[in-house]
Amino acid sequence: MAGIVGYGAYAPKYRIKVEEIAKVWGADAPSYKRGLMLREKSVPAPDQDVITMSVEASRNAIKRAGIDAKKIGAIYVGSESHPYAVKPSGTVVAEAIGATPDIHCADFEFACKAGTEGMFVALSLVEAGKMEYALGIGADTSQGAPGDALEYSASAGAAAFIFGKNDTVAEVEHTNAYMTDTPDFWRREYMHYPRHAGRFTGMPAYFKHVTGAATALLEISGTKPEDFAYAVFHQPNGKFPTTVGKKLGFKPEQIETGLLCPRLGNTYSGSSPMGLTAVLDVAKPGQLIFMVSYGSGAGSDGFIYRVTDRISKVQDLALKTTDYLDRETIQLDYGTYAKFRGKIRMSE
Amino acid sequence: MSTSARYWREIPQRYRYEASKCKGCGAVWFPPRLICAECGKREFEDVTLSNTGKVQTFTVIRVAPNEFCDESPYAIGVVELDDGVMIQCQIVDCLPEEIKTGMPVKIEFRKVKQEGQAGIINYGYKAVPAA
Ligand SMILES: [Zn+2]
């Protein structure tokens, strides 16, 4: 059965705290921290973008897979912050990992769901026998408008997964999708910041689609929440995945390992994929993992993974996701953050 | 255009740290050479440089050229990789005053510069403190 043969994540070293952002906009930090269940978020260095983080995450994935990158037959980078409007991020990433020239490539976009869609397509190509290995990546360096609620959470990170049929560390037992036309969050061409429909982003958007995908996934797989060791949901903040998990019947212990948002922020396309890497870092053979992503617009992808014996041989072959979170971070003040993120209007 | 063309030619070194190892004397050249400067042989095998090393020496740039002025102050150093090859690159993800000679570093993939607002982005390697 096809599945993940190698995985890896990357998070930048810089952070900004909720208090530091709230101070600038006269907002109440404690209520934001409580409401979003979020303490701080990652910030990309000025020399980092979706491409650089995808390269680092992919290099970690290749180390764990232990394969020759030339055997990767497709690369799909899912992101809403690709550095170029026209020129695929995947071209640079594939070149950097040494996977060119015999490789299929296109960038994916679907708000925060682009990464899991890339994973699904990579998996499907391998299952179809079109290629030996395929690489799916979710990465973002997203921005919220200054003072907007999204500014507290929009962060940066990447996760990469190599799919194959042999030597898997986690087999993919089931997949599904749940998608409708729901205008909860969008960004028009040439606009710098996204717009969102405020309160609309909760019930008819995140909760409807995540619950829709999750319920169908449990049904088609004939599983129950208690069958899973871990559950990972998209994390626009700390609260939504906790709430949706509880509603579906998952316990906090099943969710907390993959819940990175409280100290990482919302890494958008990297969100549930990074949560999955954190789970794989500690998972044991035979365990089942439940995963549902969410992307505004709107849709969710569901996956059920079964961890194999090989997991324990690869966990220590590259930096773990918590290594990136636990390492000494550099805290930014709002001014430096604004400079890093290009929020300051410069002389032309 | 000339900047882009040179950047493109150097991708194997900038992205993948490809070097050449002399089949005669074993000397490793980065960037690769056609003739070994040690023994004069012309046969090489391709090798990939190690991605960890130590800071040999460094300097802090406080008055930067125009295209890097947003980044100042920043550090440029010579890093001796674990395979003995010396490379020159920026040292990032730390304050310049925290950098010390002998500090262990890791090589990461980063943006090196942008060719203006509308031009291509140049990627390459930089050193960061080892985790
Ligand atoms: Zn020689």
Image: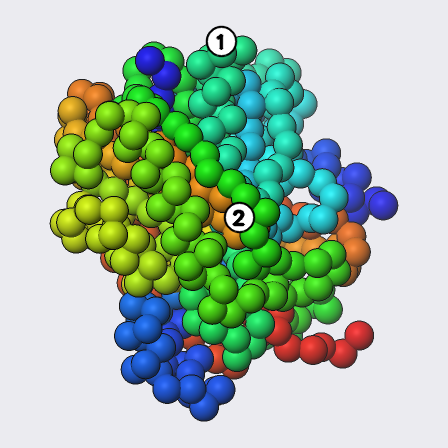
Q: CA distance from mark 1 to mark 2?
A: 30 Å
Q: Outermost residue toward the bottom? A: A26
Mark 2, Cα crowd under 10 Å, few <14 / some 14-19 / many 20+, is many
Mark 1, Cα crowd under 10 Å, few <14 / some 14-19 / many 20+, is few
Under tag 1, what secondary structure?
A: loop
In depth, the one of A210 and B99 nearer the eye is: A210
Q: Position of residue A109 (x, y in %)?
A: 60, 43
Figure colour scheme = rainbow
The residue carrying mark 2 is: A298
Image mark 2: chain = A
Q: Position of residue B27 (x, y in %)?
A: 50, 26
Q: Position of residue B16 (x, y in %)?
A: 54, 33
Numbered tag placed on residue A129 in the rendering: 1
In depth, the one of A131 and B21 nearer the eye is: A131
Check if mark 1's residue and mark 2's residue have beta carbons within 8 Å: no
| Residue ID at (33%, 39%) | A214
